[in-house]
Amino acid sequence: MVLLPGLRDRLFKEMDGAKIPKEGRLQYLCSMTGRKPQTVRRWIETDKPGLPDLESFAAICGAFDTDANWMLGLTKTRYALPREPDRGEATQSGQSGDENLAWMDYVTRQLAEDAEGCNTFYMPGDDMEPRITNGAPMLVDTRTKEIAGNGTYVLEYQRRTMVRNVESRIGQGLVLSCENPKYKETLIKDAATAKRMGLKVVGRVRLGIAVQRM
């Protein structure tokens, strides 16, 4: 995390998006936060920018409808501020429309965090049902090119892509298995044997996404 000059640069990006001219940045921030020009000027200095106080920072995030996590550099994805549920008419589920939006926003944020460093793959077949259904999207960490501990991996063998649970069993070797009971386990002596067979690790599955329609 790089607070400075990262925070200043993201602040500039927000003002550029709001069509604030460079010569108007100082006055705009003063009006927004109620701080004096000499205070605000420190936040946008070219060489050694400073940090706004918490009250001013909260005002900045609110004015730009910008998540504080992104402004601080804690996340790479910019989100709008979470919506506060109102006391309006509730839906049949007992939640208001804004509450539903807040829940979906939370899920989106979690997916974005889990997706860092991952690529999207789609489950090829019913091998992992019911855990991962045929065609379901998966977040796969393709930086993992070797079997590194027990887990679920995307593998490639004889030009066929497959998803398997990989378990290291003492005295036996590596067991490749499916969730679907109609498919049998495969036992491989070790990772070196898997390589000699031409079994390639495409990546490790970090997250499977399923939407069940009722």
Image: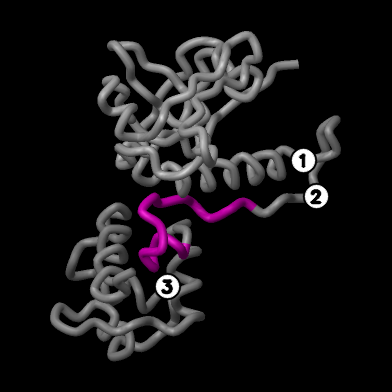
Q: Which residue is mark 2?
A: 87
Q: CA distance from mark 1 to mark 2?
A: 8 Å
Mark 3 and mark 2 lie on one chain; the one further toward the N terminus is 3
- Quadrant occupied by the N terminus: bottom left
Q: Position of residue 140 (x, y in %)?
A: 41, 34
The mark tally for this picture is 3
Q: Which residue is mark 3?
A: 32
| Rendered image quadrant of residue 27 | bottom left
Q: Nearer the viewer, residue 14 or 20?
A: 14
Q: Position of residue 66 (x, y in %)?
A: 45, 58
Q: Residues within 10 Å of mark 3 (few under 14, many from 20)?
A: some
Q: CA distance from mark 3 to mark 2?
A: 29 Å
Extent of the magenta region: 68-83
The disc labelled 1 sits on which kind of residue?
Ser
Q: Nearer the viewer, residue 76 or 120?
A: 120
Q: Is residue 68 left or right of residue 48?
A: right
Magenta stretch contains residue 78: yes
The disc labelled 3 sits on which kind of residue?
Met
Mark 1 and mark 2 lie on one chain; the one further toward the N terminus is 2
- Vertical relation: 206 (above or below) 20: above
On residue 96, the disc is 1
